[in-house]
Amino acid sequence: MIVGIAEIAASIRQARKDKGLTQRELGQRVGLPQSHISKIESGAVDLQVSSLAEIARALDLEVRLLPRRALPAIEGTVRAAVGTAGSSAASRALDSIQKELQLADQIRTSYPNLTEVENYRSILKNIQALQIDNKSLKTLQNALKPSQDLAKFFKEYNEVAKIAQQVNSATEALRTWRNHQVHLPQIDGPRQRPAYRLEDDE
């Protein structure tokens, strides 16, 4: 199968977003500046094989050359695996996040000047893009406890300051969880060698 630069760039960009990484964070993982990651994702540079391999590894992808005739069977197998492994955990996580997004919308409607709620919505949306398995679901449920307290605060209190404080607590708990999930492979895995140096001509 012949894949063009634009398709590779789009795949890298989508995989990065699915992992909840910024261009800068991905660049830090593979030793590339954010500006170069941006060029890669826009298809403005030709990737060296070594750089492509490092980026793929950082995004939990693999680069393989496959016989064209084998591709349909392989794609079917991948779709089946993705559809079964962790689908239950992902579904429950999405249900929880969706519930909190509805709460955020209610708070925003009741207190349109409460700017803190936008940060809360943003981190919830960010978590929606992550792949969540059973193990991370358990820790996510703990991180959502301040959000559950926020629901009680919203029902019982009319004081904007108290609600804002609880919104910030819920946001910080989720941000901490999200950062841990994003950097978990980097912490647990072996130290990766940089894929790019200033003297490389890419």
Image: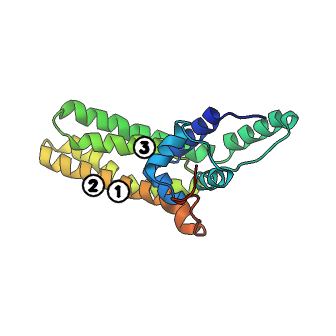
Asked if marks 2 and 3 touch (Cβ < 8 Å), the reply is no
Residue neighbourhood size for the residue with mark 2, other residues' Cα within 10 Å, grouped as few (<14), some (14–19), many (≥20): some
Disc 2 marks which residue?
Answer: 169
Disc 3 marks which residue?
Answer: 126
- Where does residue 25 sit, x and y in percent of width and height? 45, 54
Q: Nearer the viewer, mark 1 or mark 3?
A: 3
Marks 2/3: CA distance?
17 Å
- Where does residue 22 sit, x and y in percent of width and height? 44, 48
Residue neighbourhood size for the residue with mark 1, other residues' Cα within 10 Å, grouped as few (<14), some (14–19), many (≥20): some
Q: In this rendering, does residue 188 appear at all?
A: yes
Point out which mark residue 39 bears. Answer: none
Nearest the eye: 18 or 176: 18
Marks 1/3: CA distance?
13 Å
Q: In this rendering, does residue 138 appear at all?
A: no
Q: Amino acid at mark 2?
A: Ser
**What's the image's color scheme?**
rainbow
Left of 202 or right of it: where is 121? Answer: left
Comes first in the chain, label 2 or label 3: 3
Disc 1 marks which residue?
Answer: 173
Marks 1/2: CA distance?
6 Å
Task: Residue at 18%, 32% (x, y): give it.
Answer: 112
Q: Quadrant of the N terminus?
A: top right
Q: Amino acid at mark 3?
A: Asn
- Where does residue 116 sit, x and y in percent of width and height? 23, 44
Task: Residue at 56%, 62% (x, y): give it.
Answer: 194
The secondary element bearing badge 1 is classed as: helix
Q: Amino acid at mark 1?
A: Ala
Asked if marks 1 and 2 touch (Cβ < 8 Å), the reply is yes
Nearest the eye: 29 or 102: 29
